[in-house]
Image (cartoon, grey):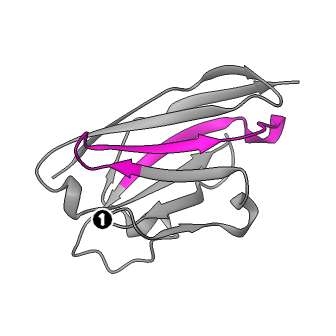
Amino acid sequence: QVQLVESGGGLVQAGDSLTLSCAASGRTFTSSLMGWFRQVPGKEREWIAAISQDGTITAYADSMKGRFTISRDNAENTVYLQILNLKSEDTAVYYCAARSPSSSGSYTRKDGYSYWGQGTQVTVSS
């Protein structure tokens, strides 16, 4: 089992950069593919990126390529999401998630993940 706690959100200006962190506890972090999602009220949770267990393979939603970078530090049990050149449309609650090794769902969908953090709010003002 994995427990996840996101941090690093807040109120930022358009054009700023931000790095979100997701601290994980539990013995299975290093064996878990990790993902980041975001959600705006009234909309579906949107997949942003995923990273392999050893951090060597990353994947991004097409609309997220270029400004978003996912990374992880297994020694620190932490996964990160860097966002460059923030835009007002990036305003959302950002969630990290851990995929269970036994999961059969796609890593691009929320049903492909078994564990979720509580989310961190990012608000971009223009």
Left-right relation of 84 to 30: right
Out of 117 and 24, give the one closest to the viewer.
24
The residue drawn where x is 58% and y is 60% is: 47
**Is 49 inside the magenta-drawn segment?**
no
Provide the secondary structure element on which disc 1 rests: loop
Residue range highlighted in magenta: 72-97
Where residue 105 sits in the image (x, y, percent)? 39, 77
Q: Is residue 96 left or right of residue 9?
A: left
Mark 1 is on which residue type? Gln
Query: In the shown orientation, is residue 31 left or right of residue 83?
Result: left
Residue at 40% in and 68% down: 56
Q: Quadrant of residue 52?
A: bottom left
Q: Spot the residue most to the left.
A: 27
Name the residue that disc number 1 marks.
53
Residue found at x 55% / y 60%? 49
Farthest residue to the top: give it. 11
